[in-house]
Image: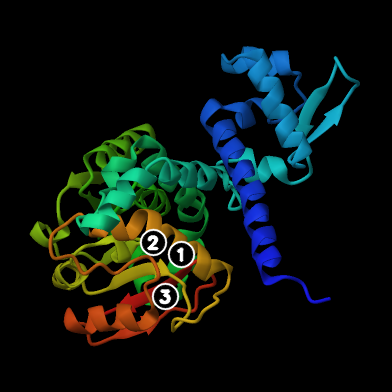
Amino acid sequence: MAEDPAETVAARVFDAAVATSDVIAIALGDRLGYYRALAGGHRSPGELAESTGTDERCAREWLEQQAVSGFLEVTGSEGDRRYGFAPGAETVLADQDALAYLSPLARQLVSAAGHVPQVAEAFRTGHGFPWSGHGADMRESQAALNRPGFLHLLATEWLPAMPDVLAKLIDGPTRIADVGCGGGWAAIALARAFPHAIIDAFDLDRATVELARRNVAEAGLEDRITVHRQDIGTADAGPYDLVMAFECLHDLPYPVRALEAMHRLGATVLVADMKVADRFTAPGDAVERLMYGFSVAICLPDSMSSPHSAATGTAIRRSTVEAYAHEAGFDRIEVLPIEHDLWRFYRLG
């Protein structure tokens, strides 16, 4: 007998609900510091609670959930159980420097889910819901997700795709602009890699700028990185040897205006944005589904919180980036041969 299509869809929704419960628990573990406390060894519920300042009964329930879901392993017998990471889980859930680190993704998704009523209202009115409305979990998790890639790959794998630019950065001195800088980790990575580089980082969200300034200060790079709360369109500090814009073009309400400003300020512009399919196809693959999920819950409402927005959305296709760049006056648009699961890299000139 053929399977009932409704049962197939119901099974898919049920599986998604189970996965969502894991995401919520991972977000709790990240926020409460449980994963950091578990790094390097096994802990009892009492030890975990004491080291994190949380309730022991709640800690035990969380540990059991993580063990049932396969993220933690259990030793000992009932009444004396101890919990530690399953193979590979510590890297993904606790190592903030690892390229596979994904705890912040769960925290980001839970933050988005917590604002569904506001996003629903934005859908009714078309007036949008701004990034700032999502609060600390959203901006901190976004910065934490991008941090490992910037610190490990930006100077060593991404910039070598532009040998002439890399040579200039190595020889120095150089000036760099980082547009939509987020937590400031791209600027920090480049300042560490190129000691003669002076970097101006730009963002519009007040709390994000404060976060970036804290990160820069903790890195001891305030003498070479300046974080501005400023629209790149009003910046007049160029020319720059390199202008970068990572994972932000699709969020900008006026992307052509921003690209025009980047074109004016620098000879070479590096844009990295989402690596979605070249054309809409339904059903789509996992990346396409993820990007539309972010677009519905976060990016499109954010962009539409500004009047007369381009309303691009997270699923920004190659043809859209190329059209924006041409309209902004760029003659050269090159997709760089950089391997990345989620981003496509464009050199504009």
Residue occupying the point 14% across, 69% down? 257
Q: Nearer the viewer, mark 3 or mark 2?
A: 2
Quarter that holds the C terminus = bottom left
Marks 1 and 2, how far apart at CA: 6 Å
Q: Report the amino acid beneath label 1.
A: Met
- The quarter holding residue 305 reads bottom left
Q: Which residue is mark 1?
A: 291
Residue occupying the point 29% across, 48% down? 131
- Horizontal arrangement in the rendering, residue 150 relative to residue 256 (left or right): right
Chain-order first, disc 3 or disc 2: 3
Marks 1 and 3, how far apart at CA: 31 Å
Q: Which residue is mark 2?
A: 295
Residue occupying the point 18% across, 65% down? 309
For residue 163, which numbered disc appears in the image?
Answer: 3
Q: Residue 279: x, y in percent?
A: 44, 84
Residue occupying the point 38% across, 63% down? 170
Q: Is residue 59 above or below residue 309?
A: above
